[in-house]
Image (cartoon, grey):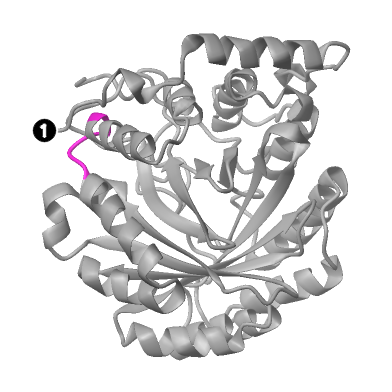
């Protein structure tokens, strides 16, 4: 049974209060946006759109990104106003983002870099055709790029997204479950960015691999993709691709692959190729904490991804993420292991615990409702921890707590 780590889990209250006071002085004269600035939708009350807007409103001051609040709300409106206008009830719309169809996730990257608030959502009206959805994505990406002043040749990037999202017209329902998801991330200091995720699970296996190859080649990583495919040896399959646009970096691309039933040592062998002994040792520490005794057995659902920056000669970024439903008995166990890992890495856990408080409330010991995927990654050869969380309606996580 897992237990919370000791009293050193949090930074001293005095230090946190000092940071709060400093932020309040900095914010004097800055207009902090509220949910009143959001354009409402006309379809339904008590929707996901309203629920998530309220959760964002609660998170902004906790995370300390008040200066970016107006941009955050506008980005949320552009991405989610049409897609989240459905009742907060299971089965009201189809989405592959979560097992129960919830059409949005929150995420954190803690370490290097730290991005304390990210969300990834279905985008556009769920009734749109594939062609209409793609047109909506292009319009939204242009609007978000202008809003957040992001770098990159949009015409070229959108051309890549069109190729990566092409579907076989002979398929009866090529857009089933969603072709695109769009997200935005915000950090202190006004830094922000967006991510466009393209579902790569449609089509024949050969066509799916060709899409990944074309995608990697766009970022100058064709050789990396070739090596990766050889390393996979039939153990992983294409899952999707994502383009990230930032204010201070060239566009980034990432390819995602899914595996099931592979040993932990198999993923260590992948890390040996991309990062060497240092990556493997840290991954061993991570799996000892997060998997516990299950480390000795074949893993269940795992996502391995490789990222590339346009025009950069750096080694590719890698990340390994585990399905929370497969790892933990309940959300309370997931929380305890996450806190133990963050303490081991000397990472401030407040961004994580604040999100849990707002998104989920009390943790269930017998159900994994909130922790979706958890992983370890490297960006520019510096490690970070990723945690994906599914927002809960009020009291959803307390029934059997």
Examine the rendered structure and indicate whether residue 208 appears above or below residue 123: below
Relative to 273, is 166 on the left or the right? right
Residue at x 48% of width, y 27% of height: 355
Q: Is residue 109 visible?
A: yes
Inspect the magenta stretch and tell me whether residue 261 lies in it: no
Residue at x 16% of width, y 32% of height: 2
Examine the rendered structure and indicate whether residue 217 appears above or below residue 69: below
Relative to 101, is 261 on the left or the right? left
Relative to 322, is 246 on the left or the right? right
For the magenta stretch, what is the residue range? 328-332
Relative to 393, is 309 on the left or the right? right
Q: Secondary structure at mark 1?
A: loop
Quarter of the image holding residue 275?
A: bottom left
Examine the rendered structure and indicate whether residue 22 appears above or below residue 320: above
Q: Which residue is mark 1?
A: 1
Q: Dividing the image into 4 quarters, which one contains the C terminus?
A: top left
Q: Residue 273 at what x, y percent from top left?
A: 41, 79
Seen from the viewer's position, the closer of residues 222 and 75 is 222
Name the chief secondary structure element in magenta: loop
Q: Residue 51 at what x, y percent from top left?
A: 55, 25
């Amino acid at each position: 049974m897992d237990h919370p780590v000791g009293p050193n889990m949090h930074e001293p209250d005095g230090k946190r209060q000092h940071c709060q006071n400093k932020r309040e002085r900095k914010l004097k004269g800055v207009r902090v946006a509220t949910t009143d600035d959001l354009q409402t939708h006309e379809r339904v009350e008590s929707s996901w759109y309203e629920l998530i807007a309220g959760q964002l409103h609660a998170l902004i001051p906790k995370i300390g990104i008040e200066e970016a609040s107006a941009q955050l709300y506008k980005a949320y409106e552009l991405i989610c106003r049409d897609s989240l206008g459905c009742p907060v009830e299971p089965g009201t719309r189809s989405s592959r983002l979560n097992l129960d169809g919830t059409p949005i996730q929150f995420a954190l990257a803690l370490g290097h870099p730290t991005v304390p608030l990210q969300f990834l959502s279905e985008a556009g009206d769920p009734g749109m055709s594939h062609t209409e959805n793609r047109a909506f994505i292009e319009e939204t990406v242009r609007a978000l790029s202008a809003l957040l002043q992001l770098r990159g040749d949009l015409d070229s990037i959108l051309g890549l997204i069109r190729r990566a999202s092409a579907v076989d017209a002979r398929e009866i329902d090529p857009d089933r479950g969603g072709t695109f998801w769009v997200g935005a991330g915000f950090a202190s200091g006004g830094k922000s960015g967006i991510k466009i995720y393209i579902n790569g699970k449609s089509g024949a296996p050969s066509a799916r691999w060709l899409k990944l190859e074309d995608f990697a080649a766009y970022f100058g990583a064709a050789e990396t993709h070739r090596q990766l495919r050889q390393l996979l040896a039939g153990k992983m399959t294409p899952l999707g691709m994502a383009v990230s646009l930032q204010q201070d970096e060239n566009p980034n691309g990432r390819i995602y692959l899914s595996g099931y039933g592979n040993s932990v040592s198999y993923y260590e062998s992948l890390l040996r190729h991309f990062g060497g002994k240092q990556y493997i040792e840290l991954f061993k520490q991570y799996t000892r904490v997060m998997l516990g005794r299950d480390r000795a057995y074949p893993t269940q659902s795992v996502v391995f991804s490789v990222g590339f920056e346009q025009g950069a000669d750096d080694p590719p970024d890698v990340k390994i993420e585990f399905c929370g439903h497969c790892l933990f008995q309940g959300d309370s166990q997931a929380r305890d292991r996450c806190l133990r890992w963050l303490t081991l890495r000397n990472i401030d856990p407040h961004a994580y615990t604040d999100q849990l408080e707002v998104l989920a409330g009390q943790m269930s010991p017998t159900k994994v409702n909130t922790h979706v995927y958890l992983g370890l990654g490297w960006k520019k050869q510096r490690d970070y921890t990723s945690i994906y969380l599914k927002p809960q309606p009020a009291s959803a996580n307390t029934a059997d707590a």
